[in-house]
Image (cartoon, coloured by chain):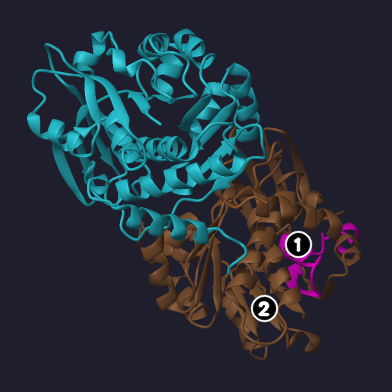
Chain colours: A cyan, B brown
Amino acid sequence: MTILVVGSVAYDSIETPFGSRRETLGGAATYFSLAASYFAPVQVVAAVGEDFGEEPVKLLRSRGIDLRGLTKLPGETFRWAGRYEFDLNTRTTLETRLGVFATFEPVLPEPYRAPEFLFLANIDPEVQMRVLRQVRRPRLVGCDTMNFWIEGKPQALAAMLAEVDMLVINDSEARELAHQPNLVRAAAAIHAMGPKTLIVKRGEFGAAAFGAAAPFAVPALLLEEVQDPTGAGDSFAGGMMGYLAAHVSGGAITDSAMRRAIAMGCVMASFTVQAFGVDGLLHLTMERIEERFEQFRRLSHLELA
Amino acid sequence: MTILVVGSVAYDSIETPFGSRRETLGGAATYFSLAASYFAPVQVVAAVGEDFGEEPVKLLRSRGIDLRGLTKLPGETFRWAGRYEFDLNTRTTLETRLGVFATFEPVLPEPYRAPEFLFLANIDPEVQMRVLRQVRRPRLVGCDTMNFWIEGKPQALAAMLAEVDMLVINDSEARELAHQPNLVRAAAAIHAMGPKTLIVKRGEFGAAAFGAAAPFAVPALLLEEVQDPTGAGDSFAGGMMGYLAAHVSGGAITDSAMRRAIAMGCVMASFTVQAFGVDGLLHLTMERIEERFEQFRRLSHLELA
């Protein structure tokens, strides 16, 4: 089943203790679609500026990603610059230039208007809503957001949340959104806002999920080599939605399918953080992905074979 | 099999967003032995001052804990005061008064000198070493430590670590001890210091273990009610060592037994944080403990029945 994603396609400049990159391909929709592309057909809605090169387009096409919804607009491509400290857990944003995203009015091509899965990656909630309005009700609508919109556009965010099935968000932002430091209570408050399922991203501590079934939580893989955490959360979302799109055919999404999908999200995020930018997502095979999925399963399994 | 623990028995004054307690029974050896007492016989080595009341002694005895190694000395009982912020993850130590622990020279009663399991709870590494010198080689020696000793007594700490099997320590302190921000690499460095097994306590994110087998990591239980995190780490260690003492009879400690022991550590810590001070550990039944263990197993299990 097809996944449609709307979100940023950007140029990132990244500094970590292990190196730096200038103006490398990034953005939430980029990481999401690369991760999801291993599992299902992906369509992207985003805007880039006149300065956006042919190389990144080729790179995304090489993964079979449908770019008919990638619009080139007058102006500059979205740019983000950030620096990670010694332990990679503290990130300082050095610069954010919205560029063409400041005025982006997405118009979906006709073949994009009936996706089975829709993911509204982190972007202005008004843009998320405009995309949602242009599609026939998908089977599953997921979204992400961040403190910038929680604080800056609470009403637009609330309107959007009321119409989505699943919110995928950072741990601290879930608590901020709910005005509630306890995560279990925050989840209940967020369910009341609309999303029946809340997926909490916890960085190197994994993820937690709150839905109709009992809560679910997993650690992240313990990695000896972490180069660059940028895009980990979007790769997680892409791996998760991709897994669902590939494995759920008709009927409800079961708790078991959801758990495996979250595990696959952790797996795809682990590939991302092991290299700079999107490099970790470019040359994977299903064999490597499945091998790491098995490694992940063993990581927290109490009953060893 | 019997567990001997050396560590602090203290009076704690605690403030959390949900209330406060003045001069309530606390200390690493207290939490450890209460948690372990549900699984195995426990012997305590510690010092208290002349101000130590009869009530806490009765309370510990009611759990069948052997207090022949609890020495009353001239002076004051160890006191700690701390405050937890809004999210319960940030703790400020308001006061630490070592009292009788400043000059404590433990002398083990004869029946204490052949424990099968020994836990050197967080205390001056010189005191930990003196206890270790007085026992016949136990089956398993575990220890804890903290940044105060990592920074203040690195040589005494190194000498002690060289002789223990298992280090149980907070995530940030593991990285500090190893001078290594990556946890997998920190584990390798710590293995080289002596302990073949490293158990990393990650607070509300659970625990990770690094030993001869593949790494293991589990999330913590997701709790709606958290009152007071004090003693969670020591309860974790007590539950874990208690489980091992109860379930490992002869032969090596298997990877499976270790995984279940860590899970039981998380279970016992979860009871502790749900009430103030030691209250959460006082009136448990094996039925409640096993029920929560099952809840824990389901929390991160990918294959649901």
Q: Position of residue A59 (x, y in %)?
A: 16, 37
Q: Earlier in the sequence, mark 1 or mark 2?
A: 1
Q: Position of residue A103 (x, y in %)?
A: 24, 8
Q: Amino acid at mark 2?
A: Leu
**Residue furthest front as drawn:** A250
Q: Which residues are magenta?
A: B29-57
- Magenta includes B38? yes
Secondary structure beneath label 2? strand
Callout 1: chain: B
Q: Position of residue A24 (x, y in %)?
A: 16, 36
Quarter of image, res A71 = top left
Residue at 32% across, 50% down: A271
Q: Quadrant of the N terminus of chain B?
A: bottom right
Q: Which residue is mark 1?
A: B35
Q: Residue at x 88, y 60 (%)?
A: B59
Would residue A257 be found to the left or right of residue B55 on screen?
left
Q: Nearer the viewer, residue B104 or B115?
A: B115
Q: Quadrant of residue B107?
A: bottom right
Q: Is B280 placed left or right of B185 in the picture?
A: right
**What's the residue type where badge 1 is placed?**
Ala
Please say if B103 is above or below B91.
below
Question: For this rendering, which residue is in front, A39 or A6?
Answer: A39
Q: Which residue is mark 2?
A: B118
Label 1 element class: helix
Q: Position of residue B168 (x, y in %)?
A: 56, 66
Residue B230 in the figure: left or right of residue A252: right
Q: Which mark is residue A105?
A: none
Q: Are marks 1 and 2 on the same chain?
A: yes
Give the residue drawn at x 19%, y 14%: A100
